[in-house]
Amino acid sequence: MVDIFQNLVFNQISFIIGFIAGVLGFWLVTKIRPAFPGFIHDIRTRSKSGGSRIISGNAQRLRQDMLRYAQGLHLASPLFSLDEIIVEPRILAPPLPAEPGQDKPSEDILTVILPYLPDWPELAARYSGKTFPLVTALSGGANLVLTGSPGSGKTTALAHLVCQLVRKEGPAGGLADFLPVYTHVADLFPERDFDQPIVESICEAVHPNTVSLPGSRLENLLKQSFQFGRILLLVDGLDEVDAEFHRGVTRFLSGLLKEYPETRLVVATTPENYSGLVELGLTPLAIAAWDEGQYLTFINKWSRSWYRHIRPMMEDGTMQIDPRLLNAWQLAENPIISPIDATLKAWAVFAGDVIGPGHLDALESYVWRMTNHLKDSRPGLEDFALQIVASQEIALDLKNARGIETDLDFDTETEQEMKAAQKDIIQRGKRSTRKLPSVLPDLLDNGILVKHREDRLSFSHVLVTAYLASKALADAQLSHFLSNQPDWSGKTLTLLFLAASRESSPELNELLSENGDPLLRGPLSIGRWLHYAPQNTKWRTKVMRFLASELQHSNIPLGLRSRLLCALLLSGDPGVSVLLRQISHTSSEELRQLSALGMGYLLDHQSVTRLGELLSEPENKISQAACFALVKIGNQQAFELLGSALLHGSDDIRRAVAEALALDPLEGVEILKEAAQMDDLLVRRSAVYGLAQVNQAWADEILNTLALEDKEWVVRSAATQIVEQRDEPDIRIPTAPQNLHEIPWLAAFAGDRGIGIAPGQPAENLLLTALAEGSPEQQQAALECLQRHPNLDALPLLYENIEYGMGDIQEAAFKTLYSFAAQGLDISKPTVY
């Protein structure tokens, strides 16, 4: 070490230069050091920006793929894009929530007198009940269960939502950052494997419909979008599966929301079964039925599209019929019609292959049109449909379907018979489906068959599957084969279509039996499809008598009466109008109210005189219902009665007449315009409430004028209140659910008793206490909470309120019991309560 220093040579010039360089370097670092973080941040930002542009570009490609795919998600996709024939799907507005201690917003009369029936929305459609778009329903932050019967337009609603989000149309702007991802459960779980990785499963389901993104890019995009909470997942087809499949889907969605809690979700299913979904925080909302105006819009759009695209391709010399005549012929019947029935009927009318006026005739025309030019395809399709129903699947591989084995538990006495039937079905499948591969491209092109993942096939609609399966069962006399299956839509619809072709139907006896079910789900499920059955069938008469008898039972909830009434109204039976005129004379106020609404639904001109008598009923709901029924019938006598009531009736009747007149876009609104200028201040004030229901710019202008310039304070006050309410948010739009211990009114209830409210069981017990001991307002709120937080310990109180309660409490208890059943809970009546 000493030697090193001894040999060291010191250069003075080099030392000075090095010293100066070090000082300068230190000074330079101190000057630029503050800029380092910004420089580094800028580099990182540029890097992220580049990555964001890549993500944004991929997201835009996925949006466009989803838009293209959504345009074909409807029955008539081989003819037209969705945009060409779409009628904006609407959601049936739920009732106003009960908020104890809060001033309840004023309601229009129609909302008060019209029962809320999410499973039977046709009655509300006739009277133009309140609705809003699906995208608006999502604006409150809630995830949704979209409910509706098969053919009610759920798939179209989801497809339209995709289009709105991609294009950022109207209210969709609030969800502009979300990627809409549509998938069907048949694509999501082709082998019933519900425990696959979440993002990978969704990617595999969506990828066949995304032409512009490789699988790796799609998966990366979905992973990042899920992580950032920017996915709106639309899951379709849950109404087509059996209970086991349903539970698997629910388990998958539960895992998805736990891993990615910010995901927005809409799941489509039936109003009778959304088991497990409310527990995941989803809010059930029903798709609204079409009213007359929507049906007319659809017919006009179909007509224009047909003559633009299809008519030029038809052979010269084909008889041309004025489209106005075709449209008028379709509208001549009851215009309250489901979207699928409207589509099938319009297609048959314009194609010129109508075989009859019924809904079943339109369905047969569709199947014939798809198969008549393909030799031997009809028997093969019928047996393929039977294979699907027998296996309780949505879709099958055509090759595997020929040798399908089902796993059913047979009773000992019928085991050999069932096994023989099963063998027969398998053999029929082997014989008849072998010819389908040769015509498969044509069947896929015309849309009657749809391809899913792993080469699995399904039919264009569950109703088509059930209809064709029923034909195969009828030909082979194998209907008893389905008797041992658990209840699911494929079984039920197949048996109903089978019954529609028979004079008698022993298979429906079990469904028609009450079996102690307070909701009468079996008979009502038959009633839903009565319009498919010819009126001369014996079993149909039996069902009609059963429904009419149950309707007139004493002390049953209004909700159950209303469903029975709807089943009768939708049956199309001419005897229903006679029945309604008869029960309008009963002592039951509810029956008189419902009979008035029913007579209006049927547009029964012979009931106008009786409805005029009901206008003078002391019970407001009866006279108000008569007002709305008279407007819907709309003949000269009806308007004369309404005009007299508007001029000389009580305040309640005047207002009901005015609000009812708003439903008539021609004569009704003209009367309102005149009423707003009349000298009688009571007539002008009534006109205010009618104009509030019009939702047109000219009506708003009149209301603003009355609010500012009318000479009478009562008129100005009413108009001002209406104008102010229009700017307030709609509290019917659902928000994300609260935990029980976070609900303000329940916390106040606990405070009044000097106790706290804790999460979990204490909050549940407190809710039951509120139901048993609270004020009527608190009891009603407790019943609504139970629909979101079901508790079977509440069953005794539910049955007590249904059997002995009255008015709103009885109705709320029935709705809660209905909700329990739809959530898959055992609602058997307790032995002691």
Image (tube, rainbow, N blue to C red):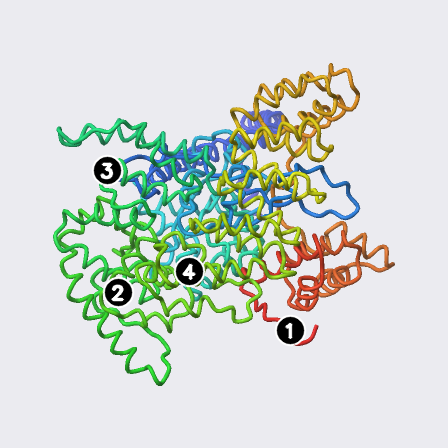
How far apart, in angstroms, are the residues tagged by discs 2 and 3? Answer: 28 Å
Disc 4 to disc 2: CB gap under 8 Å = no
**In x, y percent, where is residue 24?**
59, 24
Disc 4 to disc 3: CB gap under 8 Å = no
Disc 1 to disc 2: CB gap under 8 Å = no
Disc 1 to disc 4: CB gap under 8 Å = no
Instruction: Give the mark count.
Output: 4
Q: Nearer the viewer, residue 261 or 139?
A: 139
**In x, y percent, where is residue 770?**
77, 59
Q: Residue at x 70, y 72 (%)?
A: 833
* Disc on the earlier residue, 1 or 4: 4
Q: Which residue is mark 1?
A: 830
Q: Which mark is residue 541?
A: 4
* 822 on left or right of 356: right
* Disc on the earlier residue, 1 or 2: 2
How busy is the neighbourhood of tag 2: few (under 14 within 10 Å), some, or many (20 plus)? some
* Disc on the earlier residue, 4 or 2: 2
- Mark 1 element type: loop
Q: Which residue is mark 2?
A: 474
* Disc on the earlier residue, 4 or 3: 3
Q: In the rendered image, which quarter is residue 761 located in?
A: bottom right
* 312 on left or right of 525: left
Q: Nearer the viewer, residue 60 or 69?
A: 69
How busy is the neighbourhood of tag 4: few (under 14 within 10 Å), some, or many (20 plus)? few
- Mark 3 element type: helix
* Disc on the earlier residue, 3 or 1: 3
Query: What amino acid does circle 1 point to?
Result: Pro
Q: Which residue is mark 3?
A: 351
How far apart, in angstroms, are the residues tagged by discs 4 and 3? Answer: 34 Å
How far apart, in angstroms, are the residues tagged by discs 4 and 2? Answer: 21 Å
- Mark 2 element type: helix
